[in-house]
Image: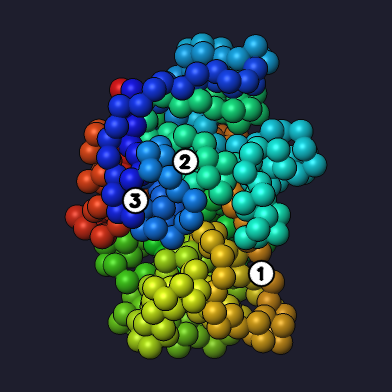
């Protein structure tokens, strides 16, 4: 089969690789119809995540048709159309029973690697380094889905792929980011980053009762989508002072809640942005946390900072004094996708949201390396790429 494989920093190749096979009674094989390039895939592409190996298959946002099931999978049948959540979760450990699926204690066979970096291991993730299990990803024609009796969600034929594909990751991730804020009617929410997760965080904040959402980015096309498609007020941080502008927009108090939808490759203007870039190049910190620092300092006293952006290790100049002295709440986490898939599918079916609004490019799987290139460089007003495989 064809698959998009990693061969080093910014080096991808479409390879012929063996088709996956059932390895466990709880496995299923899915013939992939649609997959996508995620912003967090760029962290692999740009060399920020360790333990990648040459030939690793990328991709954790995919859906398709079940073509084979293991003996232990009773809830799926050949021919079922499913979306597959990016966290691989057993469904029965203490964390899964709490519906904290991205913390599954049984799905990362390389847990010892993650424990050295983070203290404990999260779940395994499709196509996201050997640190998180070494599982083959979904930018391919077929994928093996472990614990298939827990993860995949059957979707109706009446909804095309573009409307349900993002239940795999970015829609639930944006929704959870907004939910973690504990939004009350009348609240003002600020979202750093107008990539796909940021766009869904904006839409979700409104669905959860926010009165105003303010989106912060530097790319005009992303800000335009945030305003026209998601309904946000916008700030271009290269043209305006974010702290002062947010104060002016909120009567001097700051937003009630701040969402970091940027993560480890945050860009910042001026000396602090240059400082972060130099420190990461010299391996003196792993992540550029410009957006996170700004969100903490901008949030109103007693407010909530929700972190949906991916961070891999250690950051410098973390403003802990602002958190303690202003009674801020910090909430974070990889999304517990299985918890949100069905409720969000129901919102799609009711017409509350059409997730396909973030799609700017549709390509064939064979074009994935080109897609990564333009997505990484923010060329051709690229926000979200969907890859068709069959």
The spot of residue 62 in percent (x, y) is 44, 34
Does 169 sit above or below residue 374?
Answer: above
Q: Residues within 10 Å of mark 3 (few under 14, many from 20)?
A: some
Which mark is in front, 1 or 2?
2
Does 89 sit above or below residue 9?
Answer: above
Q: Residue furthest right?
A: 94
The residues bearing labels 1 and 2 have C-alpha atoms spaced at a distance of 28 Å
The residues bearing labels 2 and 3 have C-alpha atoms spaced at a distance of 14 Å
Q: Secondary structure at mark 2?
A: loop
Which residue carries the number 1 mark? Answer: 330
Which residue carries the number 2 mark? Answer: 127
Q: Earlier in the sequence, mark 2 or mark 3?
A: 3
Q: Residues within 10 Å of mark 1 (few under 14, many from 20)?
A: some
- Contact between labelled residues 3 and 1, with CB atoms less than 8 Å apart: no
Q: At 43% from the left edge and 60% from the top edge, which residue is drawn?
A: 48
Q: At 62% from the left edge and 44% from the top edge, which residue is drawn?
A: 110
Which residue carries the number 3 mark? Answer: 8
Q: Residues within 10 Å of mark 2 (few under 14, many from 20)?
A: many
Q: Earlier in the sequence, mark 1 or mark 2?
A: 2
Does 27 sit above or below residue 319?
Answer: above
The spot of residue 165 in percent (x, y) is 43, 35
Give whichever of 88, 52 is nearer the camera: 52
Q: Is residue 39 visible?
A: no
Q: Quadrant of the C terminus?
A: top left
Q: At 47% from the left edge and 85% from the top edge, which residue is drawn?
A: 243
Q: Earlier in the sequence, mark 1 or mark 3?
A: 3
- Contact between labelled residues 3 and 2, with CB atoms less than 8 Å apart: no
The spot of residue 338 in percent (x, y) is 62, 38
């Amino acid at each position: 089969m064809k698959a998009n494989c990693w061969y080093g920093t910014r080096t991808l190749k479409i390879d012929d690789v063996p088709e996956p096979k059932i390895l466990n009674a709880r496995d299923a094989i899915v013939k992939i119809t649609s997959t996508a390039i995620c912003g967090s895939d760029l962290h692999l592409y740009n060399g920020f995540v360790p333990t990648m190996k040459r030939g690793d298959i990328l991709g954790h946002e995919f859906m398709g048709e079940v073509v084979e099931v293991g003996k232990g999978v009773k809830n799926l049948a050949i021919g079922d159309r499913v979306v597959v959540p990016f966290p691989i979760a057993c469904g029965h450990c203490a964390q899964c029973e709490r519906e904290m699926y991205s913390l599954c204690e049984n799905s990362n066979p390389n847990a010892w690697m993650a424990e050295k970096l983070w203290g404990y291991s999260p779940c395994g993730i499709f196509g996201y380094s050997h640190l998180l299990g070494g599982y083959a990803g979904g930018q391919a024609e077929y994928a093996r889905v472990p614990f298939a009796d827990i993860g995949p969600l059957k979707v109706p034929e009446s909804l095309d792929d573009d409307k349900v594909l993002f239940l795999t990751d970015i829609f639930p991730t944006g929704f959870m980011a907004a939910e973690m804020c504990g939004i009350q009617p009348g609240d003002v929410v600020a979202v750093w980053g107008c990539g796909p997760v940021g766009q869904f965080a904006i839409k979700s904040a409104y669905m959860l009762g926010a009165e105003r959402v303010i989106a912060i980015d530097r790319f005009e096309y992303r800000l335009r989508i945030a305003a026209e498609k998601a309904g946000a007020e916008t700030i271009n941080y290269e043209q305006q002072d974010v702290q002062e502008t947010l104060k002016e927009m909120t009567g001097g108090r700051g937003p009630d809640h701040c969402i970091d939808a940027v993560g480890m490759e945050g860009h910042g203007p001026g000396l602090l942005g240059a400082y972060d870039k130099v420190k990461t190049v010299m391996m003196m910190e792993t992540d550029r946390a410009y957006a996170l620092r700004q969100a903490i300092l901008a949030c109103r006293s007693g407010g909530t900072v929700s972190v949906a952006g991916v961070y891999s290790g250690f950051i410098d100049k973390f403003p802990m004094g602002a958190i303690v002295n202003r009674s801020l709440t910090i909430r974070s986490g990889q999304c517990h996708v299985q918890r949100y898939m069905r409720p969000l599918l129901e919102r799609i079916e009711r017409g509350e949201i059409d997730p396909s609004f973030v799609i700017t490019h549709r390509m064939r799987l064979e074009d994935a390396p080109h897609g990564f290139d333009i997505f990484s460089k923010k060329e051709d007003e690229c926000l979200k790429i969907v890859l068709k495989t069959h």
